[in-house]
């Protein structure tokens, strides 16, 4: 009984602490301060009480208005190269990887020396349109040097892009940076008040937990009894390929090639002008989606592999908006394990 009481009291204390953490986040959340970079290089806080800052401004002036705030810095697009990237709608789940793989082609710098971000401008059934903004890491570090060691709560950086055919301003997240905050006297006072309120809530939660010990013990016994009965009934059921997961897994492993081998085979047989946007396997059928400049040859190439048979188009092909290829969907049957070659 004492062990049960201790466990329930600890649980109630954790619940009270979690609830109070939520209240603290709501009432003590630091204010957000938006700062825009002007064309002349000055930084302009979007706040009626904040002065315009330039690279010649004193550190003390900025620290006073930025202390304990969430800083959102919007940089001028003149520091960045902005490119558009058109993709098929099926590529939506893989956008991060696709954009990262295209950086070397879109930008004049190596990917490891580049800071970049992207934003989706169009998402239609015909395809996706992305804006990609990038610059060298060293240049961005130089731009942010003015804000180093500022006692703010958090710091994020965006670039504002205005496209020739678009009138709206699009923020692109480029390089979120966390700056350690230094507690002020008001912050310390708030923490003391929070601690006092936490102690009150913990005491109240402990008293409630003590009153509910007997009910909690009874509920735990009933739950454990039901679990043991269910295990006993399950153990009495006869095993088969359909009901035993171990037997079913062993059968699939024997009759079907591993997924890694299937993907390696697709990478080997598909031509360089073809890339995949999605693959999935249902029973013995593999569904393949992608983009190619010569879709008519793909079923024959897939059928020519010992891993696949009966490769056919499962939907009509559609030409990409960018004119760089056609989107295709092909279904094929996976060959039996013994018929494939590693």
Image (tube, grey):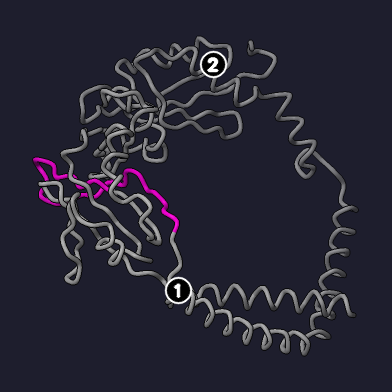
Identity of the residue drawn at 80% across and 42% down: 244
Quarter that holds the N terminus: bottom right
Residue 185: x and y in percent read: 44, 75
**Residue 121 higher or lower than 64, as above or below:** above
Residue closest to the eye, 16 or 149 = 149
- Kindly identify which residue carries mark 1: 187
Front residue of this view, candidates 143 and 135: 143
| Residue 293 magenta-highlighted | no
Q: Determine whether the residue tagged by mark 1 lies in a helix, strand or loop.
A: helix
Which is more toward the observer, 330 or 274? 274
* x, y percent for residue 259: 60, 26
Measured as percent of width and height from the top left, residue 288 is found at 45, 28
Residues rendered magenta in the picture: 158-180
Label of residue 307 in the image: none
Q: Residue at x 18, y 42 (%)?
A: 77
Is 170 positioned to the left or the right of 260 in the image?
left
Q: Determine whether, in the image, residue 221 is placed left or right of residue 286.
A: right
Quadrant in the picture for residue 174:
top left
Picture layout, residue 266 above or below residue 204: above
Q: Secondary structure at mark 2?
A: helix
Q: Residues within 10 Å of mark 1 (few under 14, many from 20)?
A: few
Q: Is residue 129 visible?
A: no
Say if the magenta span includes residue 179. Answer: yes
**Quadrant of res 243:** top right
Magenta stretch secondary structure, dominant: loop
Q: Relative to 233, is 61 on the left or the right? A: left
Residue found 64% across the figure and 12% down from its top: 342
User: Which numbered circle lies on residue 265?
Assistant: 2
Q: How far apart are the two marked residues, 2 and 1, measured between alpha carbons?
A: 60 Å
With respect to residue 169, does 184 lie above or below?
below
Q: Earlier in the sequence, mark 2 or mark 1?
A: 1
Above or below: residue 171 compared with residue 62: above
């Amino acid at each position: 009984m004492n062990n049960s009481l201790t466990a329930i009291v600890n649980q109630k204390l954790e619940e009270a602490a979690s609830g109070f953490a939520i209240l603290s986040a709501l009432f003590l959340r630091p204010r957000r301060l938006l700062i825009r970079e002007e064309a002349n290089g000055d930084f302009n806080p979007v706040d009626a009480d904040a002065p315009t800052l330039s690279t010649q401004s004193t550190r003390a002036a900025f620290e006073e208005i930025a202390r304990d705030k969430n800083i959102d810095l919007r940089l001028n697009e003149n520091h960045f190269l902005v490119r558009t990237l058109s993709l098929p709608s099926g590529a939506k789940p893989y956008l991060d990887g696709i954009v990262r793989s295209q950086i070397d082609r879109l930008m004049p710098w190596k990917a490891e020396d580049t800071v970049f971000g992207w934003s989706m401008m169009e998402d239609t059934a015909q395809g996706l349109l992305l804006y990609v903004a990038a610059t060298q890491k060293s240049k961005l570090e130089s731009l942010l040097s003015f804000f180093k060691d500022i006692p703010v709560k958090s710091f994020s950086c965006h670039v504002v892009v205005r496209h020739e055919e678009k009138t709206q301003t699009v923020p692109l997240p480029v390089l979120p940076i966390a700056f350690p905050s230094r507690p002020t006297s008001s912050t310390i006072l708030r923490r003391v008040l929070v601690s006092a309120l936490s102690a009150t809530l913990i005491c109240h939660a402990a008293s409630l937990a003590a009153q509910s010990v007997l009910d909690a013990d009874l509920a735990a016994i009933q739950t454990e009894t039901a679990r043991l009965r269910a295990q006993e009934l399950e153990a009495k059921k006869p095993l088969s390929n359909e009901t035993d997961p171990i037997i079913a897994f062993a059968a699939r492993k024997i009759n079907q090639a591993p997924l890694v081998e299937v993907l390696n085979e697709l990478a080997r047989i598909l031509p360089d002008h073809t890339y995949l946007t999605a693959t999935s396997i249902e029973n013995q059928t593999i569904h393949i989606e992608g983009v190619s400049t010569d879709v008519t040859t793909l079923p024959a190439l897939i059928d020519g592999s010992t891993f696949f048979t009966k490769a056919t188009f499962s939907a009509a092909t559609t030409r990409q908006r960018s004119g760089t290829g056609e989107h295709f969907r092909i279904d094929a049957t996976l060959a039996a394990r013994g018929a494939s070659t590693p």
